[in-house]
Image (cartoon, grey):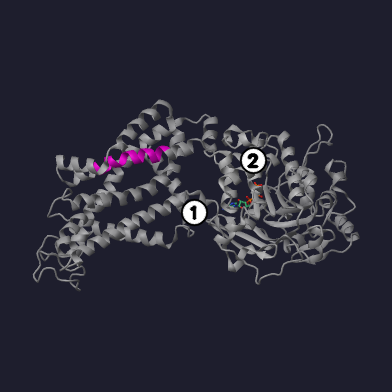
């Protein structure tokens, strides 16, 4: 059992730390960890160090200042202060580590029991815990130590027991969070026993916040022990403790300040280090760090020089790259994407799962994981957003760029009313008064088709249906009248009957507000119906781009053709078998040489393995393929299964040769952009 726990904890912490070793913990963490290690080592090896005895009165004048022989000087009785600080660390750190282990040892099982079992166990444990937490801790510690005697053991037990309620609360909260997660439900569905779920699924995940809290707890205990020692209620003389040393030295503040300064500084640095280490460990599980944070622009992958805006494009993306630093290597999630979009147009981004669609949107918005580095340019009405700092970016997000996410349930805060959430951007960005924001929120909710909007403001997200919730998130995204609305799979989490309503709504709002819309969707029928232009992504790159009607009617890139053939159609005959794209997308850490799609492409030739095809323009299409599909062979025919079998590369080559010669492009030409953006 212990081995299993060790493995589990190791996995949990290892996963957290492994991700952090790439620099997420930062230099302050490592400095703090080194300091803690140094103090611990000194305390443990104190007897082996060339130090004077902590209680030995040395020859020479007392209260002498720091010297080579005594770096921290001597105290009022002529004892070596360095030696007393090092031996004092034994007590202070010993109590810190011991009390935290005691609190964790008792609090963690109770917290897990309460969080996992819930019901009666939770009610009883938390009721007792609340009562225990209501005791004034320091008064309780003073009373117990005064009654039971001031000894190392008593101080350790009192501080350890006082920490139990906080441990119960923390571990229960973490257990509750993970007990509701899909992987635990999946284990339950598979009939896994509770004990196994606890050891394998819950405890390894709870280990990271517990480790973080353990360090913060040690800082608290070191300070508490210091306070007790200062009051003379910890380990008694002649054994030194940091609090006791500060107490002894306070009478010498004027004549020999080093006596009080040395233990104070060491204690301060140690407490600071415990807090820093705990805080950085906590950040490993913090959604802000693991999810969205201001992006780092990487000079090494940035485009070489500032670019000039093209025409009057509202949104222009040039050579955008987003690479994620992972323990496996650099994930090239977005690799040199360019496009331009005008007002009143909808651009759809399609591609298989993992092709980089969401990452492209997050990269444009500058909201990327902490492990991401970005290069390239994003121009909004000619202003380069990649040059913006976090504060400037905040003034653009919500105000000029709106976003609708996939799952409205997770996009809305469950404990805040719809009214609070819809009025917030109005009050923050547009500085409206409470009343103005409320009136505007009513208008916004009405505009997205929510009945009785005034009443809706008082409701909570869980009281709404999925479709209503998504309408609310759309209303929030539109509240500051953005120029561009990003909709990342806005209908995936919705019932199929609601999907059409939401898409119609987006289309109507686009028309009314003259916005541009960037729509990410897996659903090609949605894209065909609502998009003006389309970008097909594969392995982080654009492989085809053009007017949506054109791309779907005459796909040039075999990947686009395969995607269309894999999509179901209402017109398909009964028992029609959908084609699947054989193989799997490539590993973004180790992209193959040449065309990334070649291993799955029926038309691939040796040339595809040697050179990556550049983006070619064959008006109005842009595609990256050495063997483009012939324009005379509409996809609609092959998609229904009525088309001829896939032609051989030579056949394909001949047909392609019949098409007008394509133009090679690095990024879209102005003319092409004009076409793409409908100009
Ligand atoms: N935080 C991260 N760290 C490392 N790699 C990541 C991270 N987030 C995404 N990726 C990788 O980046 C690639 C692109 O991911 P992205 O979410 O953009 O794909 P997608 O096309 O939107 O897929 P889906 O349609 O499933 O949402 C994927 O290979 C993914 O594994």
For this view, does 191 lie left or right of residue 242? right
Q: Which residue is mark 1?
A: 19
Q: Which residues are magenta?
A: 157-172
Residue 340 lies in the magenta-colored region = no
Left or right, residue 297 beside residue 75: right
**Prevalent SS, magenta region:** helix
Q: Quadrant of the N terminus?
A: top left
Q: Is residue 435 visible?
A: yes
**Observer-nearest residue: 543 or 676?**
676
Residue 190: x %, y % from top left: 54, 31
Q: Position of residue 492 (x, y in %)?
A: 67, 40
With 405 as the anchor, is 638 left or right in this view? right
Mark 1 or mark 2, which is nearer the start of the sequence? 1
> Where is 299 relative to 424, above or below?
below
Q: Nearer the viewer, mark 2 or mark 1?
A: 2
The residue at the far bottom in this view is 68
- Which residue position is annotated with label 2? 442
Residue 269 vs residue 353, the one in the foreground? 269
How many numbered marks does the figure carry? 2
- Farthest residue, direction top: 120
What secondary structure is marked by label 2?
helix
**Residue drawn where x is 75% and y is 41% of the image:** 504
Q: Residue at x 84, y 61 (%)?
A: 618
Q: Which secondary structure, mark 1? A: helix
Q: How far apart are the alpha carbons under marks 2 and 1?
A: 45 Å
Return the x and y of residue 98 as percentages of the image width and height: 27, 46
Q: Do the residues bearing badges 2 and 1 touch, measured as CB atoms within 8 Å?
A: no
Does mark 1's beta carbon lie closer than 8 Å to ligand 1? Answer: no
Q: Give the answer, above or below, for where 113 lies relative to 525.
A: above
Camera-nearest residue between 474 and 597: 474
């Amino acid at each position: 059992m212990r081995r299993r726990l060790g493995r589990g904890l190791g996995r949990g912490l290892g996963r957290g730390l492994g991700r952090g070793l790439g620099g997420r913990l930062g230099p302050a963490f490592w400095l703090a960890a080194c300091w803690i290690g140094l103090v611990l080592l000194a305390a443990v090896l104190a007897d082996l160090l060339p130090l004077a005895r902590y209680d030995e009165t040395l020859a020479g004048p007392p209260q002498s200042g720091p010297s080579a022989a005594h770096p921290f000087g001597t105290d009022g009785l002529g004892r070596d202060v360095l030696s007393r600080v090092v031996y004092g660390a034994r007590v202070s750190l010993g109590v810190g580590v011991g009390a935290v282990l005691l609190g964790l040892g008792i609090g963690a099982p109770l917290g897990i029991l309460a969080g996992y079992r819930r019901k009666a166990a939770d009610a009883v444990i938390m009721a007792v815990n609340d009562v225990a937490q209501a005791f004034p801790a320091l008064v309780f510690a003073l009373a117990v130590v005064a009654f039971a005697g001031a000894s190392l053991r008593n101080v350790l037990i009192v501080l350890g027991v006082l920490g139990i309620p906080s441990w119960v609360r923390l571990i229960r909260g973490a257990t509750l969070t993970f007990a509701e997660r899909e992987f635990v439900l999946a284990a339950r569905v598979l009939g896994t026993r509770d004990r196994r779920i606890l050891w394998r699924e819950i405890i390894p995940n709870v280990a990271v916040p517990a480790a973080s809290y353990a360090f913060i707890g040690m800082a608290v205990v070191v300070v508490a022990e210091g306070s007790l020692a200062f009051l003379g209620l910890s380990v008694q003389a002649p054994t030194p403790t940091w609090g006791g040393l500060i107490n002894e030295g306070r009478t010498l503040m004027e004549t020999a300040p080093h006596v009080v300064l040395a233990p104070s500084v060491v204690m301060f640095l140690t407490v600071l280090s415990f807090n820093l280490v705990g805080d950085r460990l906590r950040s490993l599980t913090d959604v802000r760090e693991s999810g969205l944070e201001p992006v780092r622009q990487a000079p090494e992958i940035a485009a070489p020089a500032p670019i000039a805006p093209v025409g009057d494009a509202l949104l222009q993306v040039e050579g955008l790259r987003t690479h994620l630093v992972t323990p496996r290597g650099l994930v090239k999630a977005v690799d040199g994407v360019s496009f331009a979009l005008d007002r009143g147009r909808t651009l759809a981004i399609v591609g298989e799962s993992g092709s980089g669609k969401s990452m492209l949107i997050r990269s444009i918005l500058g909201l990327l994981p902490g492990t991401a580095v970005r290069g390239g340019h994003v121009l909004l009405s000619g202003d380069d957003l990649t040059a913006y700092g976090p504060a400037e970016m905040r003034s653009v997000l919500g105000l000029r760029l709106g976003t609708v996410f996939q799952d409205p349930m997770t996009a809305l805060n469950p404990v805040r009313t719809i009214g609070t959430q819809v009025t917030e951007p109005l009050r923050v960005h547009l500085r409206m008064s409470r009343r103005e924001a409320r009136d505007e929120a009513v208008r916004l909710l009405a505009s997205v088709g929510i009945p009785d909007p005034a009443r809706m403001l008082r409701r909570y997200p869980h009281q709404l249906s999925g479709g209503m919730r998504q309408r609310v998130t759309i209303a929030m995204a539109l509240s500051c009248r953005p120029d561009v609305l990003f909709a990342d799979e806005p209908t995936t989490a919705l019932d199929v009957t609601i999907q059409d309503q939401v898409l119609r709504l987006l289309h109507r709002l686009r028309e009314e507000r003259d916005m541009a819309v960037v729509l990410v969707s897996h659903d090609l029928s949605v894209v065909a119906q609502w998009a003006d232009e389309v970008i097909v992504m594969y392995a982080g790159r654009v492989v085809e781009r053009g007017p949506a009607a054109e791309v779907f009617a005459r796909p040039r890139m075999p990947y686009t053709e395969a995607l269309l053939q894999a999509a179901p159609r209402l017109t398909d005959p009964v028992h029609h078998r959908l084609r699947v794209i054989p193989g799997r997308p490539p590993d973004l850490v180790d992209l193959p040489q040449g065309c990334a799609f070649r291993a799955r492409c029926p038309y691939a030739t040796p040339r595809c393995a040697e050179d990556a095809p550049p983006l070619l323009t064959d008006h109005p299409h842009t595609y990256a393929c050495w063997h483009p599909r012939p324009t005379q062979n509409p996809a609609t025919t092959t998609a229904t299964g009525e088309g001829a079998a896939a032609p051989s590369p030579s056949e394909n080559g001949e047909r392609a040769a019949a098409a007008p010669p394509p133009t090679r492009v690095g990024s879209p030409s102005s003319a092409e952009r004009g076409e793409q953006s409908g100009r």
